[in-house]
């Protein structure tokens, strides 16, 4: 089982922004537009993430226990590209940082 299913820290740590054209305003199967906020002329973010204490509106469950994404199949490229590993196959430091915020130990093995 993926460690992400009992984590969710990244969905409640950062502003999750992406190109506005990824939303249902342009793509039928895109990110539901009503769950996003416009933050710049061509950028939207997930509602709830443009805050000091972010938490994506689509995140269900309790961080560090059991979580799921209510729009998993329609999530943005930003969400799809965020992983426990970075582009070099190393542990993603942003993942470690997000987990630390919730007193979760770093991922050390995949
Ligand atoms: S912070 Fe890391 S382990 Fe937690 S859900 Fe995000 S990618 Fe998965
Ligand atoms: S859309 Fe889903 S995967 Fe993306 S930040 Fe929100 S809860 Fe996490």
Image (cartoon, grey):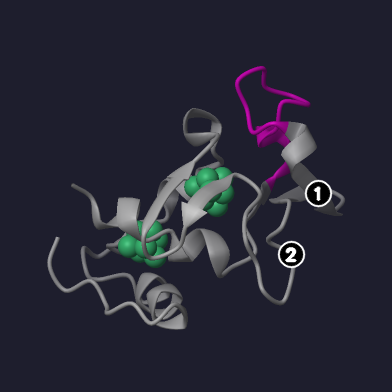
Q: Is residue 84 left or right of residue 79?
A: left
Is 21 contained in the magenta span? Answer: yes
Q: Is residue 18 left or right of residue 101?
A: right
The residue to which callout 1 is attached is 37
Could one spot residue 78 in this view of the protein?
A: no
Residue density around tag 2, few if under 14, some if 14–19, many if 20 or more, within 10 Å: some
Front residue of this view, candidates 107 and 40: 107
Residue 36 picture location, percent across and down: 75, 44
Q: Secondary structure at mark 1?
A: strand
Residue 33 picture location, percent across and down: 76, 34
Q: How many marks?
A: 2
Kindly report the distance in space between the C-alpha atoms of the residues bearing marks 2 and 1. 9 Å
Is 54 contained in the magenta span? Answer: no
x 32%, y 50%: residue: 5
Above or below, 22 relative to 109: above
Front residue of this view, candidates 71 and 39: 71
x 27%, y 62%: residue: 85
Above or below, 52 relative to 30: below
x 72%, y 34%: residue: 21
Could one spot residue 101 in this view of the protein?
A: yes
Q: Which mark is residue 106?
A: none
Residue density around tag 1, few if under 14, some if 14–19, many if 20 or more, within 10 Å: some
Q: Which mark is residue 50?
A: 2
Above or below, 61 relative to 32: below
Q: Secondary structure at mark 2?
A: loop
Q: Earlier in the sequence, mark 2 or mark 1?
A: 1
What main secondary structure does the magenta stretch of the protein show? loop
Residue 52 picture location, percent across and down: 72, 77
Mark 2 near mark 1, Cβ–Cβ under 8 Å? yes
Front residue of this view, candidates 93 and 59: 59
Q: Which stretch appears magenta?
A: 19-32
């Amino acid at each position: 089982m993926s460690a992400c299913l009992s984590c969710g820290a990244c969905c409640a740590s950062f502003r999750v922004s992406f190109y506005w054209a990824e939303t249902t305003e342009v793509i039928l199967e895109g990110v539901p537009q009503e769950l996003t906020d416009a933050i710049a002329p061509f950028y939207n973010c997930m509602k709830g993430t443009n805050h000091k204490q972010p938490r994506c509106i689509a995140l269900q469950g309790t961080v560090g226990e059991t979580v799921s994404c209510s729009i998993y199949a329609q999530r943005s490229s930003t969400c799809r590209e965020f992983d426990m590993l970075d582009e070099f196959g190393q542990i993603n430091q942003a993942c470690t940082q997000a987990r630390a915020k919730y007193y979760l130990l770093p991922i050390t093995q995949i």
